[in-house]
Amino acid sequence: MVDNPTPRQLVVVGGGMVARRLVDALRARDTAGQWAVTLLCEEPRAPYDRVALTSYFTGRDPEDLALGGQELWDDPLVTLRRGVAATAVDRRSKTVATSDGRVLPYDSLVLATGSYAAVPPVPGKDLRGAFVYRTIDDVADLRTYVEQLRTELGRPLRGAVVGGGLLGLEAAGALTALDVSTTVVEFAPRLMPLQVDDGGGEALRRLIEALGVSVRTGTATSKVTGRLGRVAGMEFADGDRLEADVVVFAVGVRPRDELAREAGLEVGERGGVVVDESCATSDPSVWAVGEVACIGGRCLGLVAPGYTMAEVVVDRLLGGGGTFPGADLSTKLKLLGVDVASFGDAFASEPGSLEVVISDPVAGVYKKLVVSDDARTLRGGILVGDASAYAALRPMVGRELGGDPAAHLLPEGAAAAPAGDLPEDATVCSCNNVTAGAIRCSVTDGGCTDIAGVKACTRAGTSCGSCLPLVKRLVTTELEKSGVEVSNALCEHFDLSRAQLFDVVRVQGLTTFSEIIDRHGRGRGCDICKPVIGSILASLGTGHILEGERASLQDTNDHVMANLQKDGSYSVVPRIPGGEVTPEGLISIGEVAKDFGLYTKITGGQRIDLFGARIEQLPRIWRRLVDAGFESGHAYGKSLRTVKSCVGSTWCRYGVQDSVGLAIALELRYRGLRSPHKIKLGVSGCARECAEARGKDVGVIATDHGWNVYVGGNGGFTPRHAQLLAEDLDTETLVRTIDRFLMYYVRTADRLQRTAAWVEDHEGGLDAIRAVVLEDSLGIGADLDDAMAGHVDGYEDEWAAALDDPETLRRFGSFVNAPDQPDDTLVYVSERGQPRPATDSERTGGAVLIAGTTLEVRR
């Protein structure tokens, strides 16, 4: 930095994320020291991450939310005034009066005062127990009140959130984290009305209700009722009532423009300080950024446009001509554990738009792409339940997708799109306006060799983080082009790869996420590393997946040991080893399905899937199945699913070996084996291959002399044919070979990597794996054998274990305060003699006639 004896004075009013960004950007670019900055932060702490406010409930220390390090505040040209508010601006003398009695001169003033939480003018809004959700102090007060009230009343608490938008669902997550039975009340006809359409809103509602949160849409709150001066309930415009011990208002925000109004600056019709494209106000010495700025006639409530405004003002302060390019209102959030993303023209408002929609009844997701009328150009989209495609799709808005648009919504579609195909000017990080070209340049010209370096160089991924998967792919692609060895770090919280982390946990005997991240990681973890560590711990047999903090590591389906369906119900799949089942077993399954009103279907893996179970019914269904001799089929987990078989030599005149007997033995051996991705096996009794074994991760085909074993096959979006690993093995050698192959895969594969991709990526390919498994080239054969033996000996049925644990069973309630009360939003009709979820039109019509079939509505 070049010393400047008389730097100009910049006063920034506001201590939020955008204010921090502006000061950070100015100090990074002002190498001549032209400006000295004073930041007035009304809160008693430095700027923090409001987007992650709910994570305060996972660790009480507010410092966990601090933005960046202390080095910015140690800069001699930066003065941070905590707990000091600006009380008046004198534009004529160019001074700011502060709450501690000082008067600060300025050459330029930036208003970054943000917004305050709006509260509807309803009676009772000021009662004790009524809160807003905006700052750390707000959530700290909420937590303290809930904990004290629960102790005083000695019973579970009931809560309500007024507002079903982004902030409202965050607040619902906070109450849920405090173990408060929660109802979300939204005036609009759907949740998140500004981000998702009717289909997305319905999917989101189902997912959130499945987590135990009640939802009331199309409901206006008319009054908060009280008793003894504190909240006791709510009344609605339709005359209905709701009992509640705590109410959180999250109906939106209003710009904090009172300072500007009093100073005589122009403000918008609906509030906010009016600024031009340079973010200058009606006074050229005063700027406004973030939520308080009214640009183009509106205030923008997202952090990404605020960051862009901050960069524009910095450019102007340093003599540049930067202008605001417009707002990218794309959002990607995890609300109550549910992924939600919206980008581009999500509501297809542009003429000639087509909508491509996929609603997955198994995974519980809603995905929509909006494309041009020739189905080539992407215009926008909505993703609910699974937003993994967001990072790859959002930068493609306004560009040709190539191929079938629907392919980009399939599980492996957008994630598999090559990063090298992304245009240079495509925006990858909308929060910080970073293009694909800038990221590539940081690698090729800037010398960055990992994600941390690229983040420091470009700021990509330093805000919401939703772009990080795409950033990582871009960096990896550029490094590989340059011949540089690519880092296999699991995520930004762990420098180790999944395989390295597996070995560390195994060797050190670690059993909790907390001790793993304390010793070998940093931060609080993320949606990448938490499920991976949960899987590793399960693979190593460290305890039940829902025991203690392990429960918080699990994905949606593992969390309830069942598969979430599109209507918020669940499917249950008991294990049927090798597809062999007795008549008594079939009758037991049939009786369970009949008694609980479940839809039944035979799967491609030779099992029976039972659909339509409510969450509070799951333990009772498991009990019936366990008592009948069944156990969990692990259809919900990244683990062994099935071992499919033909009848083999037992019945078939072409069979040369007992394929059913081997399939049953293999399934009972590998059941419950947690792995990087799901595992499927198949055993065919002859070369006619009726079990389709060569389409499995491990396929076994009988020969006249024993068994041939194939590995690395799968179906799905990218089908792979399994490759021959070994021929004519006797049964004992075959089992040892499969043992070692699977355990080597479990230990060394990447996150969510199927065996086919693992074989391809493994150094030396299948030949090297063959040497490890059959020839013990690495000298780890005995270790792999012992690991598999430990798995076999330590196996316990997850359903049966849960049934024996009262603490685990507490999770399976429809509502916290009424765990056995059925969810009356689940509505079914009878079709072909079985129940299925009712459509919206069928919900209101009682019995209707479709295609000649009478459908009777049941609840």
Image (cartoon, grey):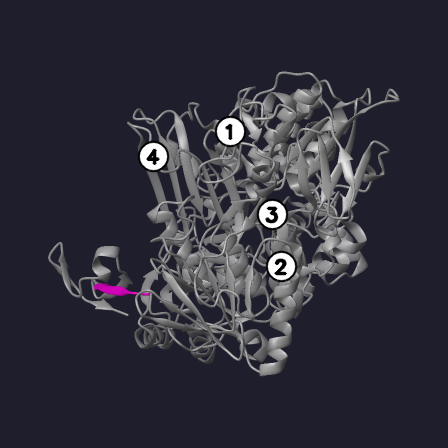
Q: Foreground: 351 or 624?
A: 351
User: Distance between the Cα atoms at labels 3 and 2?
Assistant: 14 Å
Tell me if mark 1 has few (under 14), some (14-19) or many (20+) residues whose alpha carbon lies within 10 angstroms of its own: many
Amino acid beneath label 3 = Val
Q: Residue furthest left?
A: 852
User: Distance between the Cα atoms at labels 1 and 2?
Assistant: 35 Å
The C terminus - image quarter? bottom left
User: Distance between the Cα atoms at labels 3 and 4?
Assistant: 27 Å
Amino acid beneath label 4 = Ala
The residue pinned by badge 3 equals: 51
**Front: mark 4 or 2:** 2
Residue 743 image point, x, y percent:
66, 53
The N terminus - image quarter? top right
**Front: mark 1 or 4:** 4
Tell me if mark 2 has few (under 14), some (14-19) or many (20+) residues whose alpha carbon lies within 10 angstroms of its own: few
Residue 825 image point, x, y percent:
33, 65
The residue pinned by badge 2 equals: 138
Magenta stretch holds residue 827: yes
Prevailing SS of the magenta stretch: strand
Residue 644 image point, x, y percent:
44, 56
Residue 590 image point, x, y percent:
32, 73
Q: Which mark is residue 348?
A: 4
Q: Which range of residues does the magenta coloring cover?
A: 826-830
User: Distance between the Cα atoms at labels 1 and 3?
Assistant: 22 Å
Q: Is residue 375 left or right of residue 478?
A: left
For marks 1 and 4, the one nearer the N-term is: 4
